[in-house]
Amino acid sequence: MTDGPSPRQVAEVAARVQALDNEPVIVAIDGRSGSGKTTFAEQLCTDLGNSVVVHLDDIYPGWDGLGATPALLAAQVLAPLRRHEPAAYRRFDWDRCEFGALVPLPVAAVVIVEGAGSSVGIARPYADLRVWLEADDDTRKHRALSRDGDAYRPHWQRWARQEEQLFSADRTRDRADIVLRS
């Protein structure tokens, strides 16, 4: 079992991002739960500087909302960024099962969106670089349950079915610019 993305992998993606000529550069880090997306995004953000991370865990509309997330992401964050307008999203309150506070996105040269569904369907064309992370099933499950514990355990299969359906229909991995194993 690996601990996540290697520094070499992060550096390679950072170099690809720095070569892009867009502002802001939008990077989507996609993959199944526990594949290392959050760790990778945070490391990439640190390497790049002048960047911000949007975590889809803040946008998913609950345990059955994976399929709705790309449209929410596109409408609230990605489309405004492409129009050079301020972007903000409603943070989902997992305890109350409702959307709560509006979270404004700081202006940055690079916006890293991490989470399952970040490069799917309507969100895909907004991404300047699409990174797919993968890991074996046992590693992913261990990471996810170590991270989220009892809050996630009863929903693991439910979420996995949504991922399988969404990613299969969209061919998300095949459409990625970079595929990394973490």
Image (cartoon, helix red, strand yellow):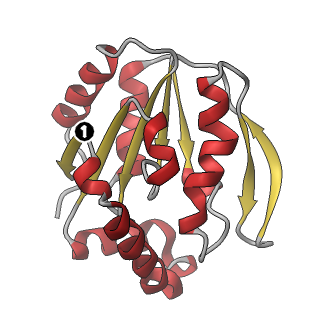
Decide which of 64, 171 is in the foreground and name it: 171
Q: Looking at this view, is 51 or 3 the one in front?
A: 51
Tell me if 105 is positioned left or right of 43 in this view.
Answer: right
Kind of element beneath mark 1: loop
| Residue occupying image coordinates x 32% and y 15% | 18
**What residue is rendered at 25% in x and 39% in y?**
177
Displayed quadrant of residue 171: bottom left
Q: Can residue 111 be seen from the camera position used here? A: yes
In which image quadrant can residue 143 be found?
A: bottom left
Quarter occupied by the N terminus? bottom left
Q: In this view, does 63 lie to the left or right of 44?
A: right
Q: Which residue is drawn at 32% across and 73% down?
A: 142
Residue 113: x and y in percent read: 49, 41
**Closest to the observer, 160 or 85:** 85
Measuring from the top left, give residue 7's x and y in whole percent: 21, 34
Is 56 situated left or right of 129 in this image?
right
Residue 180 sits above or below residue 169 on the image = above
Mark 1: few/some/many CA within 10 Å (<14, 14-19, 20+): few
Residue at position x 60%, y 44% in the image: 74
Residue under numbered circle 1: 177
Asked if 137 appears above or below 36 in the picture, the reply is: below
Residue 182: percent from left, percent from top:
21, 53
Q: How many marks?
A: 1
Question: x%, y% of residue 4?
Answer: 26, 51
- Name the amino acid type tagged 1: Asp
Q: In this view, does 148 lie above or below 3?
A: below
Can the viewer see residue 143 in this picture? no
